[in-house]
């Protein structure tokens, strides 16, 4: 299981099995309107060969977190604090020249839209072969053979011929497979997949997810899988981090979080999501309101303007006191453990049937 055991803000050493350890990460952007707190004190660990799912609405900080892990933020407008320890090496303080060597080699990313990651001017084969040559020093011939091998692995038919095709000659699903081949060509230890199947139809989506799982078995990579779709995550991840307003609000194994979620925001996400095989008479319940501005986040619990359970918490704690995320399986909410359990059983669980 992916280890998620330390509290936010804690600067702990990496665990024995932790491949990536993020500690108290804070990412801020300077804009004309002020400072955007995109990530605000986030901690998590990912083990080798395991998948951590990160879920949350747009603007929750999940994509910014992962672009920061890859060092793809603009250093002129972005401030990064905290630690991103990759096998003990802190990526926050690693110079850009060294990050270039890590990207595509030790750490790789699959983007939502292959058209933004694949250049229309070069053949698919060349785009897979180039990072391999750059990072391994392989010859052109070796790199081309490797591109054919990778296209075969990701299930592209006639790979020896298709290796010379341009991206526009591939279907959407094939382009996504080609991008996976490109990301995995150097056998990275950490793969970050950002909404990798959102643009695909359900059948192709299922094929790509199966492919990722098979390749993870073969390559042993750790995966961070970012999505807003809790249905996809149940099938893909070992552990789950739910993000809201740049913070982690709930974490645990995927099984625990989906079976017995403890945070009102996670309840909201699950209640607003269609369920495969669920009752069609049970209406979906959207979360009221919209995600908060990161320029001027709400005081106290960032979810309080949208939360329908603030009356269960004494005084004005929800709007004045920031709840912290405890160790291990945890939810950052002022409700007591008993209240969370009772509300879930009485009010939330019936909606999820
Ligand atoms: Fe809702 Fe209060 Fe819990 Fe935040 S701390 S999720 S506002 S009950």
Image (tube, grey):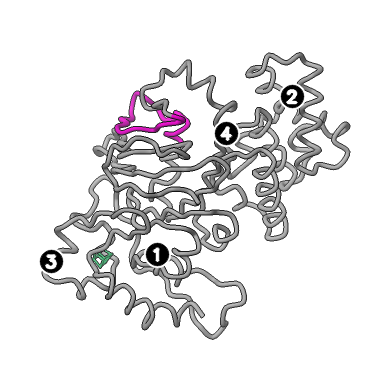
Segment colored magenta: 67-87
User: Which of 304 and 321 lies nearest the eye of the viewer?
Assistant: 321
N-terminal-most mark, 4 or 1: 4
**Residue shown at 20% from the left, 75% from the top:** 311
Q: How many C-alpha atoms fall within 10 Å of the one at disc 1: few (<14), some, or many (≥20)?
A: many
Q: Report the residue marked by disc 4.
A: 189
Q: Indicate if the residue with disc 2 has its beta carbon within 8 Å of ligand 1.
A: no
N-terminal-most mark, 4 or 2: 2
Q: Nearer the viewer, mark 4 or mark 2?
A: 4
- Please tell me whether residue 80 belongs to the stretch shown in magenta: yes
- Please tell me whether residue 252 belongs to the stretch shown in magenta: no
Q: Secondary structure at mark 2?
A: helix
N-terminal-most mark, 3 or 1: 1
> Where 39 sits versus 342, above or below?
above
Marks 2 and 1 in Cβ contact (< 8 Å): no
Q: Report the residue marked by disc 1.
A: 266
Q: Report the residue marked by disc 2.
A: 126
Point out residue 229 in the picture as x, y percentages from the top left corner. Answer: 52, 59
Q: Nearer the viewer, mark 3 or mark 4?
A: 4
> Where 118 sits versus 294, above or below?
above
Q: Indicate if the residue with disc 1 has its beta carbon within 8 Å of ligand 1.
A: no
* Cα separation between marks 3 and 4: 46 Å
């Amino acid at each position: 299981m992916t280890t998620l055991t330390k509290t936010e803000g804690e600067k702990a050493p990496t665990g024995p099995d932790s491949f990536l350890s993020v500690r108290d990460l804070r990412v801020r952007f300077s804009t004309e309107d002020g400072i955007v707190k995109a990530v605000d004190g986030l901690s998590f660990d990912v083990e080798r060969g395991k998948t951590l799912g990160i879920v949350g609405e747009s603007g929750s900080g999940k994509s910014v977190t992962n672009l920061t892990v890859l060092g793809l933020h603009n250093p002129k407008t972005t401030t990064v604090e905290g630690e991103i320890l990759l096998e003990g090496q802190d990526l926050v303080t690693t110079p850009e020249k060294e990050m270039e060597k890590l990207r595509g080699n030790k750490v790789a990313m699959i983007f939502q839209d292959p058209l933004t990651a694949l250049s229309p001017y070069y053949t698919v084969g060349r785009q897979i072969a180039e990072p391999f040559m750059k990072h391994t020093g392989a010859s052109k011939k070796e790199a081309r053979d490797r591109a054919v091998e990778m296209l075969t692995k990701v299930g592209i038919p006639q790979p020896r011929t298709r290796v010379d095709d341009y991206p526009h000659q591939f279907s959407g699903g094939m382009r996504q497979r080609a991008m996976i081949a490109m990301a995995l060509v150097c056998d990275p230890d950490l793969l970050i997949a950002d909404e990798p199947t959102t643009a695909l139809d359900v059948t192709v989506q299922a094929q790509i997810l199966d492919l990722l799982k098979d390749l993870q078995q073969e390559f042993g990579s750790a995966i961070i899988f970012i999505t807003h779709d809790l249905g996809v995550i149940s099938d893909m991840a070992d552990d789950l981090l739910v993000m809201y307003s740049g913070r982690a609000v709930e974490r645990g194994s995927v099984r625990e979080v989906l079976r017995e979620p403890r945070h009102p925001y996670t309840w909201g996400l699950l209640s607003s999501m269609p369920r495969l095989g669920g009752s069609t008479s049970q209406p979906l319940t959207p979360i009221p309101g919209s995600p908060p501005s990161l320029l001027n986040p709400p005081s106290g619990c960032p979810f309080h303007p949208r939360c329908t359970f603030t009356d269960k918490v004494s005084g004005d704690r929800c709007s004045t006191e920031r709840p912290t995320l405890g160790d291990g399986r945890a939810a950052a909410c002022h409700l007591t453990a008993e209240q969370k359990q009772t509300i879930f059983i009485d009010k939330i669980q019936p909606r999820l049937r």
